[in-house]
Amino acid sequence: MGPESGALCVVDINDGKMTRIKPYDYDTEHTDAHCNPWKIEARGKTFKPPQRINLTHFGLAYKTRVYSPNRVLYPLKRVDWDPKGERNPQNRGKSGYVRISWDEAAQICADELKRIKETYGPEAVLCQSDMHGEGKHVAPSHGCPNRLLSLMGGYTLQMRNMDSWEGWYWGAKHVWGCEPVGQQAPRTNLIPDIAKHSESLLFWGCDPEVTPLGFGGHLPTLLCYWFTELGIKSIYICPDLNYGAAIHADKWIPILPNTDAALQLAIAYQWITNETYDKEYIAKHAYGFDKFVDYVLGKEDGIPKTPAWASEKCGVAEWTIKALARHWAKKIVSILHGNGGSFIRGPYSSEPARLEIMLLGMQGLGKPGVHQAKMIEWNMWAKTYPVPFTPKFLPPMPHCADPLRPVDGDLPEELNMKRFCLTPEQEERAPELIELFKQLPAPKQFIPRCLVHKAITEGHAEWYGMHCFSTSQVPKENNYRLPTNKYQFEKMVYPRPGLSRVHMIWSSAPCNVTCWNDGNLFIDAYRHPDIETFVVQHPWMENDCYFADLILPVLTKHEMNDLGNDYSSGVFQSIYLEEPCIEPRGESLSDFDVCAKVAEKLGPEYYDVYTGKLSEKERVRFFYKATGLEEHMSWEEFQEKKIFVLPIDEE
C-alpha cells in the first residue's frame, strides 16, 4: 500500500512467466552480526520474530492479479462516446469498449484537457488520485495525474476524507490531542510493556487476523498467540465473530453495530457509582470530568446511563456490561485496534472515540500496561515504534507524487504540508531530482471524497474542515506536529466563488462505486451530463472503470523498476531494489509513463518538466542517492545485494 512498498518477496520465473512468489528469508549471518535482531522478554518467556518476511496470502498469490483475466492490456474507448460528437453519458456502465492505439488515446486525453481548460478553466478537471494502491515510488499508483494537471494551472482535487480514522480525527483529537489523527502518540515500546504488565486486552472492533494483511504481514497473529501464552486474557467486542475472535478470544461480546457509545457510557456509570476509577489520576491529568459525570449520571438530560439503559441500545446483556466494568476496573487493561473498523468509521463515530479515551483515562492511561495500541501501521507518524524494530536511522524515501496538496492560502505556511517534497538534505544528495520534484501550482479547489457524488449531482456541496489532510504535515523536531484540529471547524464550499464546476474526471483510484459511501449515487454522478469526459488509468477492469470513457492500461509493480521499502512488516526495516519479473503485459505502462504519454501530446514544455528528463532506471538510481544510504552501501554493492537491512536501535 502506497506510499510504502511493503513486505518484500522472491519471485520464481520460468520461461518469462511468474510461477511462484515466496517470502524473503533474511541472511541471518548478516543480520545477527550487524542488525541487532529484536526480541521481547516478559514473564519468563521470550518472543522472537521469525527471520523471514511474514508475507500474507495476498502477497503470496499476487501472480493471480498479474495474470488476471480482468487485466486492462490496451487503451480502450467507450464505443458510444465520441469526443467530437455524441458523448452519451447516460450509457456509462452499459456500453462496451473498443481497443485503440496509445497514440490515439493520449491525443484524445490531451485534447480534452486543453478543451476543458479553455472552456471552463483548469479547475473543471477533477483528479481522483488518493491513497491506497500498489506501493510504488518512482511511478506511484496515485498522485501522478496531479503533477501533470498542476502543470496545466491547477485542478479540483478529490481530497481523501479521514475514513480510516474518522472517529479518532473528529472526536479523540479533542480529548487528548495526539496528532496527526487522534490515535495514541507517541507509542514507544507499547507491545513490550503490554506483554510485561497487562492482564487483559480489549480487542475493540479489531481483527488482528485479517486487518493487518493489507498493511504488513502476519506478525500480529504471532503476537496474539504469545499474549495468550503469557496468560493475558483477550476480550473481543465486535458485532461479528471475526477471525481474530474465533481464534484468540477468551471472551467474545457481540454488540449491535455502532452502539458502542452506549456500552462505554454504562461502563463509566458503573465506575463512577462504585468509585472504581483512578481518582488521583483524573485529579492530576484531566479537566472537565465533573461535566462528564453529570452527563453519565443523568443530571444533564435526566437519563442515567445505566447498564439497563445501555443494554436496550447495544444488545449486550445487563449482567455482561456489569461484569466487563468490574473486570476492567480490577485488572490492568489495554485496548487494541487495527484502526477501529466500523466502530470508528460509522455515523457519529466521534462519540465512541472520545469515550474510549475517557475510559482509558479513568483507569490511568499511560501507567504500565494501560494503553491504546495498534496491530497495524506500527511505523506511521512515529519516531519510535510500539514493536521494538525502530532502526538506528531511517532513510527518507522520495515519492514522486502530489496526491494531497492543500489549496494555496487555505492553511498557514507553518503547517508545512510537504510530505511529498524533497527535503533539503535529499536535494543536496541528489540534485538530479530537484527539477522532477519542483513544487508545481496547487489545486484550485477540492471536494472530500465522500461528497464527490453529491457535488456533481447537485452542483454544490458544503462541509467543514478537510482542507488539510493532516498526515501530510512534515513533523518538526522530536516528531512534533502542529495541531490541526482548529481547522476542522472552517466551512468550505464547492464550487468556490468564481470557479467552475467539474466537467472532466481523471482517476487513478477508481473504486468509489464499490468501496465508498453510496455507490449508487456515484453511478448517478458518473452518468451526469455535466461530466463530459471520464478518464481512468488502472491495471484491472473493475469498479469505476466500467463507467469510464477512456481506460489507460497500467502495469503492476512486478513489471517495473522501483526502489522499494519495507517499513512496517515488523521484523526489520529495509530498502530494496525491485526489478521487473516479467515484461509488461500487453501495452500497459507505469502510472508515471501513462501521464508522460499525455504530457508528450501536450507539448515538450509539459513533457520535459513532468519527467524531469529522467528515465525510470535513472529515477531509481537517484532515489537511492537521495536516501543517503550510499554512506553505508555503494550503489554498485546495492545493485548486487539488492537489499539494505537497517540495523535496529538497541535503545
Image: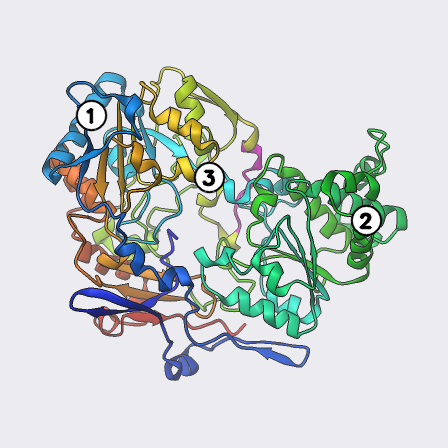
Sequence-earlier tag: 1 or 3: 1
- Identify the secondary structure beneath mark 3: loop
* Vertical side of 168 occupied by 390: above or below: below
- Disc 1/disc 2 C-alpha distance (Å): 69 Å
Give the side of residue 198 with respect to residue 46, left or right: right
Given contact means CB atoms under 8 Å apart, are the residues at marks 1 and 3 in contact? no
Residue 20 in percent (x, y) is at 29, 68
The disc at residue 283 is 2
Dot 1 surroundings within 10 Å: few (below 14), some, or many (20 or more)? some
Res. 469 mark:
3
C-alpha distance separating marks 2 and 3: 34 Å
- Mark 3: amino acid: Phe
User: Residue shown at 31%/47% (left/top)?
Assistant: 141
Q: Are marks 2 and 3 in contact (CB under 8 Å)?
A: no
**Residue 574 falls left or right of residue 478:** left
Q: Is residue 52 left or right of residue 556?
A: right
* Label 1 secondary element: loop
Residue holding disc 1: 80
Of 502 and 78, the residue lying toward us: 78
Tell me: residue 378, above or below residue 86: below
Q: Which residues are magenta?
A: 480-487
The numbered mark at residue 317 is none
